[in-house]
Image (spheres, rainbow, N blue to C red):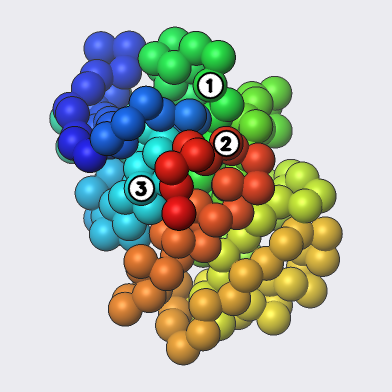
């Protein structure tokens, strides 16, 4: 597989991971909170992209406005869902006819939910590190989680443990990664695998995949 630097709407910096054989789907991945150092190069975001490409899918990571080489100003979540929409639109134009998955980690999960709440679409959704105690974003995001949404939760997440998340969002499907906090140190490849495995319930996998 290989990676290419791309621009979305001549505005957002992005990286496209391309599988070795003809892709059968495309996955858009949104990164964690920029004001705390979150970018598309976050190691967990990179692990998700790698796992998706290994499944035979395009994996598109992008920097939200004001991050890295992306234009624009930070708006504390007000307009960042539009960046998710732009990335999804770019992905659908790049791969017309292929089903699309949407993944987000932490702030990226909240922005993915906001995009969906505003009428955005994706054939499959997987979220990671949904910090239910985040005072800025959780009050709006948690009620917007569609039934059956897949969430990877850290057992000891300081922004809401897996048990607390399960109680708050009983209609979600939650996979718990043990022994880690919100940053999933040492378990990031496992998170990538869990995300890709669940997306594969909907997104087609090439026949050569083991």
Tag 1 near tag 2, CB within 8 Å: no
- Badge number at residue 88: none
Look at 36% across and 48% down and name the residue there: 54
Residue 160 in percent (x, y) is at 59, 75
Q: Is residue 192 left or right of residue 128?
A: left
Decide which of 52, 82 is in the foreground and name it: 52
Distance between mark 3 and mark 2 Cα atoms: 13 Å
Distance between mark 1 and mark 2 Cα atoms: 9 Å
Nearer-N-terminus badge (1/2) = 1
Secondary structure, mark 2, is loop
Look at 64% across and 25% down and name the residue there: 120
When the figure is inspected, residue 174 is found, relative to residue 150, above or below; the finding is below
Nearer-N-terminus badge (3/1) = 3
Find the residue positioned furthest to the bottom. Answer: 179
Q: Is residue 174 left or right of residue 41?
A: right
Instruction: Name the quadrant containing residue 182.
Output: bottom left
Decide which of 97, 39 is in the foreground and name it: 97
Residue identifier under label 3: 54
Residue 133 in percent (x, y) is at 60, 68
Residue 84 in percent (x, y) is at 47, 30
The quarter of the picture where the N terminus appears is top left
Residue identifier under label 1: 98
Q: Is residue 155 left or right of residue 165?
A: left
């Amino acid at each position: 597989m290989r990676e290419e630097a791309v621009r979305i709407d001549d505005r957002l910096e992005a990286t496209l991971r391309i599988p070795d054989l003809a892709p059968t789907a495309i996955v858009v991945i949104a990164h964690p909170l920029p004001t705390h150092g979150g970018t598309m190069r976050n190691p967990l975001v990179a692990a998700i992209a790698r796992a998706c490409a290994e499944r035979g899918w395009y994996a598109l990571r992008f920097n939200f406005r004001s991050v890295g080489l992306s234009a624009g100003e930070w708006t504390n979540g007000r307009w960042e869902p539009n960046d998710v929409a732009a990335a999804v639109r770019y992905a659908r134009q790049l791969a017309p006819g292929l089903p699309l998955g949407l993944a987000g980690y932490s702030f990226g999960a909240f922005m993915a939910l906001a995009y969906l709440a505003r009428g955005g679409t994706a054939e499959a959704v997987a979220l990671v590190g949904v910090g239910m105690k985040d005072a800025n974003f959780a009050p709006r995001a948690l009620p917007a989680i569609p039934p059956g949404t897949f969430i990877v939760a850290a057992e000891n997440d300081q922004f809401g443990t897996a048990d607390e998340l399960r109680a708050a969002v009983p209609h979600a499907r939650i996979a718990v990664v043990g022994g880690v906090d919100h940053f999933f140190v040492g378990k990031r490849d496992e998170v990538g695998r869990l995300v890709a495995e669940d997306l594969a319930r909907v997104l087609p996998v090439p026949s050569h995949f083991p």
